[in-house]
Structures are given as structure tokens and as C-alpha cells.
């Protein structure tokens, strides 16, 4: 057996997917199931489509290509605004692509016409989070212009909240997006969806306050972890036992809790802070910042404290844990979204579907 190892609980993942599909469809919301945190793993994409997700979303065109080669039928949505250099691949492989620039849209249109197709786009509107999108005050005029570009079909408009600025989706900003959609339609422009965002916007569906007109969501974190990091909560109707990371102990010794000597910056450029608690039983596990951020690790066994990490090692305080450890024992963790993202991206972490 090789370690570190990340084990996915297929039963829990399917449970979450069924719940969210039903929740969205009952509210007449089209669901894009986002698989970018799994690096476009085709097993996850196939499972989401099997339980009723409408579209598979990923931010990397290479992942979409790999999923198509693995037999995932799609449709696919590209969630990151495409670089001009990758547009030929995007047009050949993506059904709907997020865009936020007129120039990019024109390049997409020209490439689509070369391929004898019409490229569907979701044009992004910035309603406050300051990530991608035309600023909402200028959105109507720009999107009207977008709709005239040859080779392009305006599939809808969308907004993203929470991921960059941490802005929480609410009735006010979702109403703003819905009103922009109404103004564009009054110009005689037709489109299918108003995509109101991600996991952080699910609470509006839960409590029945989502403004009329918003009919599309792009969901990743709730499906994959049952959590909502932006709102700082776990969904009570979803499961959180979706992934377990196992790391192996390579050193187990009593040591002081504070380093000896003048403290500078660590290998990651940080200035670490230590609390003097006397001598403690420290376990070093063979996984580090190259594989997973130390603050993304949540030990399953009570009494274990994640202290700090370098690129290759993470140091744990296991003094207060009732379990007695030995060299070679495995420590189990749940992961935050950031932790799962990096662990999935690390070629040094074995992935297994349980």
C-alpha cells in the first residue's frame, strides 16, 4: 500500500449529488456539476450525469479533453475565461464557455465559424465580487453588443460571488443580476439562463428567497464536501464524509513545543508562531505543503493538533490523543476545499475511489 492516500467515498458523494440535483430541479434550476477540484476525474463526471446533473463544469480545457476521451458525453461548460491561445481547443471541445471580454468573444466567434459551428457563451457580469465580468453598470450595453457577434449564441448571463472577494450572494445582488437580464431581454435578445453562482448561493434556494429569473447554478463544493466555505457552514442535509486523507507517521518523539534559536521565516516564507506548552509528543507525517496546505487538514481522531508544515513534512501534536501511535501508523484527515484542491492536484498523493 502506498501513502499518502486520498480515498473518495462514492456512496456519500452520490448521496450529495442526488440531494442537490433534486433541490435544484425542484426549483427549476439548471445544475452545472463542477468537477475542477477533482482535476476533471471522469468517474465523478459520469456519476453526476447519471444522477441527473445537466452540465459538467471544469475550469481547465485539458480536463474537458481528457473527460471526452474517457467517454464522458457532457455537455461541458468551461468555467474559466479562455486564454486566446487555447480558443481553438475550446471551440472543438466545449459546449458553453464563460467569457467576459468582447475581444475574446469575437475570437471565439471567428474560430467557431471556421469550424462551421455556433459557440454558446455565458457572459459574466460582475455584481460586486470583483472577479471576472463586465461591471454591472455597463453590462446591458456590452452584452447587447456581444449578442450581435457572428458565430456566437448567447446562452445566458452569469455572475460569480464568494470565490474572490468573499461577497455573499443575497436577495439584493441576485435581484440585480435578474434585473440586468430583464433589461437585455427588453432589447429583443433571447437567452436561456441566468446563472446565479455557486455553492455560496444555495442558501437562497433552501429558504425560498432566490429572486425569480435566476435559473442556473454552478455547484462544486457542496457536491464534493457537503460544505459552504463562504458562509462558514456545513449543510445539515448533506454528508461530509466524502473524502479521507491518510498519511503515514515517519517520526514520533517527545520534543519541546518552541524551537531553540532565533526565529526567521520558514521554507514557505512565513514567520511561524509557537506556544510554549513544554515537551510534547510530536508525530511527523510524510506529507507537506507541496501536497496539501497544513491548515486544510482536519484530523478525524480527537486530540490531534496540526502544528506546522514544511514542503515535505507536517508536524502533529498527538499528546492529547487517546490513541497510541507507532512509526508507520496512518493518521486520517478530513479536508477543507483548499486542502482537497491541492491534494487532488498532487501527483504524490494516491487517489482511490472507495
Image (cartoon, helix red, strand yellow):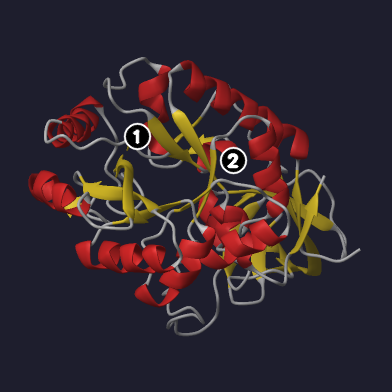
User: In the image, residue 20 lies at what x, y percent?
Assistant: 55, 27
**Number of dots carrying numbers:** 2
Residue at horizontal 41 percent and vertical 74 percent from the top: 271
Q: CA distance from mark 1 to mark 2?
A: 26 Å
Q: Secondary structure at mark 1?
A: strand
Q: Are marks 1 and 2 in contact (CB under 8 Å)?
A: no
Q: Which quadrant of the figure has residue 12?
A: top right
User: In the image, residue 97 lies at what x, y percent?
Assistant: 40, 54
Residue at horizontal 65 percent and vertical 46 percent from the top: 45
Q: On the image, numbered disc 1 is attached to which residue?
A: 193
Of circles 1 and 2, the one toward us is 1
Q: Residues within 10 Å of mark 2 (few under 14, many from 20)?
A: many
* Image: 74 above or below 173: below
The residue closer to the viewer here, 149 or 265, is 149
* Image: 329 above or below 172: below
The residue closer to the viewer here, 175 or 11, is 175
* Image: 255 above or below 326: below
Kindly tell me whether residue 159 is visible in this rendering.
yes
Q: Is residue 309 left or right of residue 250?
A: left
- Return the disc, 1 or 2, that comes first in the chain's sequence: 1
Q: Quadrant of the N terminus?
A: bottom right
The residue closer to the viewer here, 269 or 167, is 167
User: In the image, residue 109 lies at what x, y percent?
Assistant: 32, 62
Q: Secondary structure at mark 2?
A: helix
Residue at horizontal 65 percent and vertical 48 percent from the top: 73
Q: Which quadrant of the figure has residue 150?
A: bottom left
Q: Which mark is residue 225?
A: 2
Amino acid at each position: 500500500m502506498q501513502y499518502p492516500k486520498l480515498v473518495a467515498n462514492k456512496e456519500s458523494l452520490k448521496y450529495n449529488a442526488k440531494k442537490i440535483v433534486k433541490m435544484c430541479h425542484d426549483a427549476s434550476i439548471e445544475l452545472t456539476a463542477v468537477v475542477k477540484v477533482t482535476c476533471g476525474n471522469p468517474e465523478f463526471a459520469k456519476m453526476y450525469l447519471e444522477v441527473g446533473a445537466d452540465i459538467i463544469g471544469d475550469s481547465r480545457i485539458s480536463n474537458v479533453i481528457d473527460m471526452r476521451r474517457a467517454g464522458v458525453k457532457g455537455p461541458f461548460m468551461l468555467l474559466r475565461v479562455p486564454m486566446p491561445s487555447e480558443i481553438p481547443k475550446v471551440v472543438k471541445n466545449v459546449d458553453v464557455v464563460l467569457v467576459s471580454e468582447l475581444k475574446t468573444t469575437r475570437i471565439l466567434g471567428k474560430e467557431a465559424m471556421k469550424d462551421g459551428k455556433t459557440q454558446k457563451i455565458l457572459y459574466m457580469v460582475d455584481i460586486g465580487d470583483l472577479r471576472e465580468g463586465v461591471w454591472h453598470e455597463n453590462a446591458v450595453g456590452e452584452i447587447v453588443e456581444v449578442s450581435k457577434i457572428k458565430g456566437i449564441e448567447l446562452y445566458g448571463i452569469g455572475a460569480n460571488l464568494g470565490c474572490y472577494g468573499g461577497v455573499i450572494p443575497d436577495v439584493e445582488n441576485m435581484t440585480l443580476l435578474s434585473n440586468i437580464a430583464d433589461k437585455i431581454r427588453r432589447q429583443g435578445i433571447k437567452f436561456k439562463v441566468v446563472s446565479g453562482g455557486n455553492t455560496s448561493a444555495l442558501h437562497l434556494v433552501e429558504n425560498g428567497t432566490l429572486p425569480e429569473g435566476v435559473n442556473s447554478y454552478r455547484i462544486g463544493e457542496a457536491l464534493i464536501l457537503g460544505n459552504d466555505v463562504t458562509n462558514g457552514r456545513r449543510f445539515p442535509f448533506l454528508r461530509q464524509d466524502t473524502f479521507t486523507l491518510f498519511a503515514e507517521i515517519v517520526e514520533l518523539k517527545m520534543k519541546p513545543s518552541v524551537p531553540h534559536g532565533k526565529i526567521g521565516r520558514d521554507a514557505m516564507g512565513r514567520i511561524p508562531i509557537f506556544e510554549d506548552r513544554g515537551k510534547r509528543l510530536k508525530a511527523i507525517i510524510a506529507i507537506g505543503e507541496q501536497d496539501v496546505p497544513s491548515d486544510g487538514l482536519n484530523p478525524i481522531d480527537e486530540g490531534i493538533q496540526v502544528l506546522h508544515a514544511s514542503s515535505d513534512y507536517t508536524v502533529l501534536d498527538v499528546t492529547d490523543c487517546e490513541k497510541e501511535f507507532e512509526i508507520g501508523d496512518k493518521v486520517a484527515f478530513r479536508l477543507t476545499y483548499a486542502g482537497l484542491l491541492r491534494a487532488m492536484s498532487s501527483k504524490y498523493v494516491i487517489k482511490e475511489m472507495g
